[in-house]
Amino acid sequence: RKEVEQDPGPFNVPEGATVAFNCTYSNSASQSFFWYRQDCRKEPKLLMSVYSSGNEDGRFTAQLNRASQYISLLIRDSKLSDSATYLCVVNTNTGNQFYFGTGTSLTVIP
Amino acid sequence: DGGITQSPKYLFRKEGQNVTLSCEQNLNHDAMYWYRQDPGQGLRLIYYSQIVNDFQKGDIAEGYSVSREKKESFPLTVTSAQKNPTAFYLCASSIDPNRDRRLAKNIQYFGAGTRLSVL
């Protein structure tokens, strides 16, 4: 079983739409959770950390459900510039290893 | 500016040749990592190092070697034993949370990557 699983998509949505991505993780000892954004042929960049209470950064909202072991990312009012691959990342801290999902591809259409 | 520098950006390997990818960071991070990414796929861990002079194999270490002689540097050698080396190689670093328990989050930062192709 993979440490982190994501729906690969692709998600094709019109501008202004709201889109949600989910991610599940297998290790209940996981302590840190993140969403990264990766543009085509570029390195992943941190989009936001995910906190237990949920957190929001502008149009982006991240949620963590420890009981069900899943993380979500909600993007409101999608922009063309949001088109990218979104990676779910989990860290157990103890071993200092990071586990990546395969990514969810988003294309925002004019 | 602080950050992670990978070089070269593009690299070509001849059959039977070893090549070395450079990764340098000035973030004073303890841990460093090497990942491989194939088209349309996720990141796979090759090697990681939590401290100078120590490193561990990741999921796909065969055909690769690393060294960690300095905190700032973590070069990756792709040896001739790696039969399918064409990929996007990413280096990353992070603070070791075990060193500072006050850290709420252990964030990983990436270099711009090296694209390796076989001639």
Image: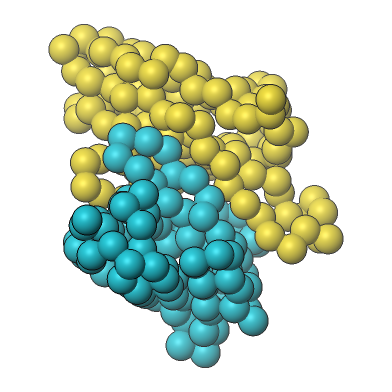
**Closer to the camera in the image, B109 or A56:** A56
Q: Horizontal and vertical percent for residue A51?
A: 63, 73
Q: Residue at x 82, y 54 (%)?
A: B100
Colour cyan belongs to chain? A
**Closer to the camera in the image, A109 or B10:** A109
Quarter of the rendering occupied by the N terminus of chain B: top right
- The answer to whether residue B84 is visible is yes
> As drawn, is B93 to the left or to the right of A99?
right
Q: Residue at x 36, y 49 (%)?
A: A81
Q: Quadrant of residue B54?
A: top right
Q: Horizontal and vertical percent for residue B113?
A: 42, 29
Q: Residue at x 42, y 38 (%)?
A: A43
Q: Is residue B45 above or below residue A66?
A: above
Q: Quadrant of residue B52?
A: top right
- The answer to whether residue A28 is visible is no
Q: Residue at x 57, y 42 (%)?
A: B109
Quarter of the rendering occupied by the C terminus of chain B: top left
Colour yellow belongs to chain? B
Q: Is residue A65 above or below residue A13?
A: below
**Closer to the camera in the image, A61 or A86:** A61
Q: Horizontal and vertical percent for residue B2?
A: 68, 29
> As drawn, is A30 to the left or to the right of A1?
right
